[in-house]
Image (cartoon, rainbow, N blue to C red):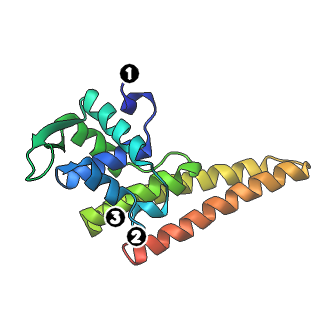
Amino acid sequence: MSPMTRQPLTTEHALLGFLHQRPMHGYEIYQLMTAPNGLGLIWRLKQSHLYALLDRLARDGYVAAASQAQEKGPPRQVLALTDRGREAYLTWARSPVSHARDMRLDFLAKLYFARLAGPAAVAHLVAAQRDVCREWLAAAVRAERSIASDRYLRLVHEFRRRQVAAMLDWLDLCEEGNA
């Protein structure tokens, strides 16, 4: 089973996202992935783990490697998306996250790549995520109303409701500045 069908990992999709921009070698992807003004803000990734993920993506048919000669040193592997990789990336990048817990990593990574694609991609992603968050908020309100007297349960549902409301406010900020 491939990494994309097992359980989609934000990191793997982000690797595909960098290669969606253009073919690159692994170290170049690592530098972009860990940049402090980009995805390095939301997670840490060891270089050895990145190379293991790239190997798996190549083995599973999402990326293809080609040797590129260098003036000094051995040839380096330049990676490019396959059609399968491009499709997997675009499906992921254009889809809202389906769980509130995924906003911190998954949505922020999607937003990063949407910004690279332009204002229309940001607007589409934010609008789709806002729709999903509104569904979460409605479900949280329904759950809160169904609780009779257990104070702890009410507090848990209140927390969830307020968390989703804060996400909606934050999505408004994303849209105002077009991220």
Please give the name of the residue rendered at 38% of the width and 55% of the height, measured from the top-left corner: 110
Q: Secondary structure at mark 2?
A: loop
Q: Choose mark 1 or mark 2, whichever is in front.
A: 2
Q: Label 3 sits on what residue type?
A: Val
User: What is the spatial separation of the Cα atoms under label 2 and label 3, in whole angstroms?
Assistant: 18 Å
Where is residue 111 shown, x and y percent of the image? 39, 61
Look at mark 1 in the image and give the residue it sits on.
1
User: What is the spatial separation of the Cα atoms under label 1 and label 3, in whole angstroms?
Assistant: 32 Å
Q: Which quadrant is the N terminus positioned in?
A: top left
**First along the sequence among labels 1 and 2:** 1
Q: Secondary structure at mark 1?
A: loop
User: What is the spatial separation of the Cα atoms under label 1 and label 2, in whole angstroms?
Assistant: 34 Å
Report the front residue among 138 and 124: 124
Q: Determine crowd level at label 1: few under 14, some 14-19, many 20+ residues with C-alpha closer than 10 A.
A: few
**First along the sequence among labels 2 and 3:** 2
Q: Choose mark 2 or mark 3, whichever is in front.
A: 2
Please give the name of the residue rendered at 22% of the width and 34% of the height, measured from the top-left corner: 84
- Where residue 122 is drawn, which disc sits there? 3
**First along the sequence among labels 1 and 3:** 1
Q: Determine crowd level at label 3: few under 14, some 14-19, many 20+ residues with C-alpha closer than 10 A.
A: many
Q: Choose mark 1 or mark 3, whichever is in front.
A: 1
Residue 144 vertical position relative to residue 168 in the rendered view, above or below:
above
Q: Label 2 sits on what residue type?
A: Asn
Q: Label 1 sits on what residue type?
A: Met
Image quadrant in which you'd find residue 86: top left
In the image: residue 167, left or right of residue 40: right
Image quadrant in which you'd find residue 67: top left
Where is residue 172 shown, x and y percent of the image? 48, 72
In the image: residue 165, left or right of residue 74: right
Please give the name of the residue rendered at 42% of the width and 67% of the height, measured from the top-left corner: 36
Look at mark 2 in the image and give the residue it sits on.
37
